[in-house]
Amino acid sequence: MSSTLGGQREIEIHHHFVWGSEQEAISVVLDEYTDRHADVRISEEQTVINALRLMIKSRILREDPPDVWDEWPGANLRPTVEAGATADITDLWERTGMDDAYFDGMVDVARFNGEYHAVPLDMHRISNLYYNVAVFEAAGVDPARLSDPDELVEVLPALADHAENPVAVFGRNPFGLLQLWETLFLGHGDPSGYEEAVGGRPSPHRSTLEAAFDTLGACLEAGPENPEFMDSSDLEGEFSDGETACINNGSWTTGHMAGSDMAFGRDWDCVPFPGTDGAHVVNTNALVPAAHTAGDETVAEFLEYVGSAETIERFNTISGSVPPRSDVSVSDLHPLSRQLHESFGGRATQLPSMCHGLAVRPEQVVELKDAVATFLQDRDADAAADTVVATLSA
């Protein structure tokens, strides 16, 4: 339960928003909450995402988890829910109308066997192609007219004539390779094939899985040397410095680019990755309450505040991400975030990301990362596809 110190209630919160626009956004949200609730103190711990997961798992095993932590929900969170380590907050969702306000894809990843155990904060499209407008125009390439990943590969030589790197991929953490690979898998295939593969029947789509690795190899060949030393911030830095013609990254890059010297629409822009228009691979960060907070009015009040339309709008306006609720005002959002919010609220298919654990269990994410990391070294698409088939079939 939330503790009381000197008459002031305390909520212990751990999260991974440690830099950039996301750190600013969470700071504003937490500060506004304590300004409104002078009797509540937030004990905040910030840790990078991978270290945070290990810390939370360790504290759960010691039966001393924080009151609230942030996590990728969906399949990634299911083992923690099934272990009884999270609180059932169904009453909160139903009482506040969150179950009607959140987009369907977000409802699906926050609900487990009919019970809600998480509150999504944001929403990100993974299947993006961020591009340098001047480079693409100089090369005579319209990115919106590229119909599939193969057509993107075909124009890389033309882009190379006008940029130091026609495309860049980061591989210091294998998730950079994995999120591009899953985007390529969708781009070479279709939503139903993606859903069937992550649902445990990848074998009928083995040729598409291998084609995604072939294209990943082509992107690595065309990109900078030693991608294994690049991380996400390096990737965004090269793009915002004008060194790279295009990149694939989650829509958190919008927040980074909004703070750069490049102007949206004039210097940089973003389209759905070739072959994925109308179907989005998505991710979300969600706040999860520990099981010991069940019935704690202070924690419930905090989660209600975090999941409200007002707070969701404020967090995503600052971070550059997309509000996961349909009922927020979008007037102050980045123009690209407004476009995505409209798309998510329309008929676009929302596919949970493998890379970020929404679609597959934690141990499968580890195995998929191993597959792309091995591919980075040996470039054996056939062997990599076999590994993925075995992993998703498990």
Image (cartoon, grey):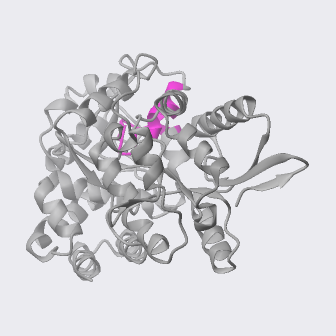
| Image position of 296 with respect to 124: above or below | below
For residue 204, side relative to residue 317 (left or right): left
For residue 29, side relative to residue 191 (left or right): right
Q: Position of residue 139 (x, y in %)?
A: 24, 28
| Image position of 98 with respect to 231: above or below | above
Image quarter where the N terminus lies is bottom right
Residue pictured at 38% horizontal, 29% vertical? 337
**Nearest the camera: 157 or 294?**
294
Residue 251: say if magenta.
yes
**Nearest the camera: 129 or 62?**
62
Image quarter where the C terminus lies is bottom left
Q: Where is residue 309 in the image (x, y as percent from the top left)?
A: 46, 31
| Image position of 330 with respect to 378: above or below | above
For residue 148, side relative to residue 354 (left or right): left
| Image position of 263 with respect to 75: above or below | above
Q: Which residue lies furthest to the left in this view?
A: 204
Q: Position of residue 186 (x, y in %)?
A: 19, 54
Residue pictured at 63% horizontal, 50% vertical? 297
Residue pictured at 67% horizontal, 34% vertical? 33
Residue pictured at 62% horizontal, 39% vertical? 26
Residue 179: say if magenta.
no
Residue 192 visible: yes
Residue 222 visible: no
Magenta region, residue range? 237-258
For residue 25, side relative to residue 147 (left or right): right
**Nearest the camera: 103 or 316?**
103
Q: Residue 354 is drawn in which quadrant? A: bottom left
**Nearest the camera: 229 or 372?**
372
Q: Residue 278 is drawn in which quadrant? A: top left
